[in-house]
């Protein structure tokens, strides 16, 4: 660390941490970004699918090899042989996070952020005389750093939140276990994300196949919510599906991890502190995707921190506006998706099939509500079941 004192220290150089530090450095603050790993982004624990290129490019410019595939649609295999083909041009992208995460961190450094690798935040003091003091261990030993503002972008294991007394602990019923096999070649439709969902497959989550065209590999994986995953471990189940669906597929690499799927934490700010990304459970509770929300939260967090410096107000009450902004941008949507997940996963197989038929008619008729009249009884039943499950 070059200095003993910073305007802002950010813990964790994932997408959320790199974005917020870069934005703050662009606003001329002295920013320190700490990452406990040896290299940013490695090992990758992710299916690597994300939002549209247009959205993503607002955080760039990125090196060409960060973007593997432009996604033009989703294919979903549902229960009882049902399936959905949702064509939507430029709906998403496949990233190469081994390249993408370091690229985000480099952009931050270029704009003035001091990035220190193998530096782990071990403890945080309460606010004293306008500063928090953190203890950092690195290969050079232990050091103490003073900061006017602290950002916890330290992912699902977020100790930063817990160290300041926020209720950020992962509860089993709100945690998804995910595993990803990087497989040689393209297994499914090249510009589509393919899913297997429902009682015939993995009901407590889904199986995915995401093509990485530039690398000529596919991310084949699965994720499900922990308490319901009785029986075989997820690795075994996913391997069985890989062999069943794509016999002889060659696995290059296996990674896995946990995903918070509770919806945004109720409280993720404190005096002179905010949490960003997985640390604040900003992940989409239906899909488990959290890259784009972490980055958007980073951008919003930087704006609110800038305002805090201008008004010299670093109170918990002031930072509630950061939570409100995140709520508007993705939190409300995540709440509805959480309800939807509970509804869908709670349905018995025959009800799931009925629901898939209704959705299929809707999608195949350009999202026209009149198409629901094709299955009036099934539509009424599904709407009633959804209403019942969410009240
Ligand atoms: C199997 C799996 C598949 C997934 N698939 C997708 C997908 O397809 N699409 C998608 O959008 N999302 C996916 N996700 C979720 C996605 O990976 C996360 O939502 C995203 O990485 C969150 O970004 P972040 O910046 O909040 O945290 P992270 O990317 O987790 O970064 C946190 C960083 O903080 C560092 N850190 C932690 N503690 C400390 C400390 N004390 N001191 C210093 N550094 C610290 C960590 O080393 C890490 O680098 C998946 C997750 C898993 C596990």
Image (tube, rainbow, N blue to C red):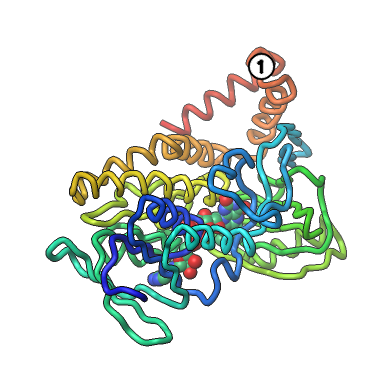
Residue 194 position in % (x across, y down): 74, 45
Quadrant, the N terminus: bottom left
Q: Give the answer, above or below, for where 56 lies relative to 9.
A: above
Quadrant, the C terminus: top left
Q: Is residue 378 visible?
A: yes
What residue is drawn where x is 21% and y is 50%?
Answer: 316
Residue 231 position in % (x across, y down): 61, 64
For disc 1, the marked residue is 368
Residue 149 position in % (x across, y down): 27, 59
Q: How many marks?
A: 1
Q: Give the answer, above or below, for where 262 lies relative to 387.
A: below
Q: Is mark 1 within 8 Å of ligand 1?
A: no
Q: Quadrant of residue 197?
A: top right
Q: Quadrant of residue 390?
A: top left
Front-lying residue, 220 or 57: 57
Q: Quadrant of residue 153?
A: bottom left
Residue extending furthest toward the right: 248
Front-lying residue, 190 or 374: 190
What residue is drawn where x is 35% and y is 73%?
Answer: 121
Report the side of 58 relative to 243 (left or right). left
Q: Is residue 230 visible?
A: no
What residue is drawn where x is 57% and y is 49%?
Answer: 60
Residue extending furthest toward the left: 129
Report the side of 254 relative to 310 (left or right). right
- Estimate how packed mark 1 is, as few (under 14), some (14 to 19) or many (20 or more) residues with alpha carbons within 10 Å: few
Q: Secondary structure at mark 1?
A: loop
């Amino acid at each position: 660390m070059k200095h003993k004192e910073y305007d802002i220290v950010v813990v964790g150089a994932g997408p959320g941490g790199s974005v917020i530090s870069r934005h703050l450095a662009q606003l001329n603050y002295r920013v320190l970004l700490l990452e406990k790993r040896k290299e940013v982004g490695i090992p990758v624990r992710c299916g690597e699918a994300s939002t549209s290129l247009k959205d993503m490019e607002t955080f760039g410019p990125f090196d060409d090899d960060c973007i593997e595939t432009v996604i033009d649609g989703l294919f979903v295999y549902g229960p009882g042989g049902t399936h959905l083909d949702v064509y939507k041009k430029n709906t998403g992208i496949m990233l190469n996070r081994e390249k993408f995460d370091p690229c985000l961190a480099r952009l931050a450094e270029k704009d003035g952020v001091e990035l220190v690798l193998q530096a782990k935040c071990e403890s945080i003091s309460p606010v004293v005389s306008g500063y928090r003091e953190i203890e950092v261990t690195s290969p050079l030993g232990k050091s103490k750093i003073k900061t006017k503002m602290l950002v916890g972008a330290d992912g699902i294991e977020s100790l930063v939140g817990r160290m300041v007394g926020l209720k950020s602990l992962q509860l089993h019923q709100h945690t998804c276990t995910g595993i990803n096999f990087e497989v040689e070649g393209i297994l499914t439709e090249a510009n589509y994300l393919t899913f297997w969902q429902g009682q015939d497959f993995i009901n407590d989550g889904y199986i995915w196949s995401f093509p990485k065209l530039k690398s000529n590999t596919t991310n084949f994986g699965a994720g499900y919510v922990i308490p319901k995953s009785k029986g075989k471990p997820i690795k075994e189940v996913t391997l069985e599906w890989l062999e069943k669906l794509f016999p002889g597929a060659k696995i290059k690499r296996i990674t896995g991890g946990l995903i918070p799927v509770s919806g945004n934490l109720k409280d993720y700010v404190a005096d002179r502190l905010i949490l960003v990304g997985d640390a604040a459970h900003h992940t989409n509770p239906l899909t488990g995707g959290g890259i784009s929300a972490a980055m958007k939260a980073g951008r919003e967090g930087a704006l609110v921190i800038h305002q805090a410096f201008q008004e010299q107000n670093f109170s918990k009450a002031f930072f509630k506006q950061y939570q409100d902004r995140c709520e508007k941008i993705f939190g409300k949507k995540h709440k509805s998706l959480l309800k939807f997940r509970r509804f869908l996963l709670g349905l018995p197989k025959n009800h799931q099939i009925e629901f898939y038929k209704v959705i299929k008619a809707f999608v195949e008729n350009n999202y026209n509500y009149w198409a629901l009249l094709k299955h009036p009884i099934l539509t009424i039943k599904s709407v009633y079941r959804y209403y019942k499950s969410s009240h």
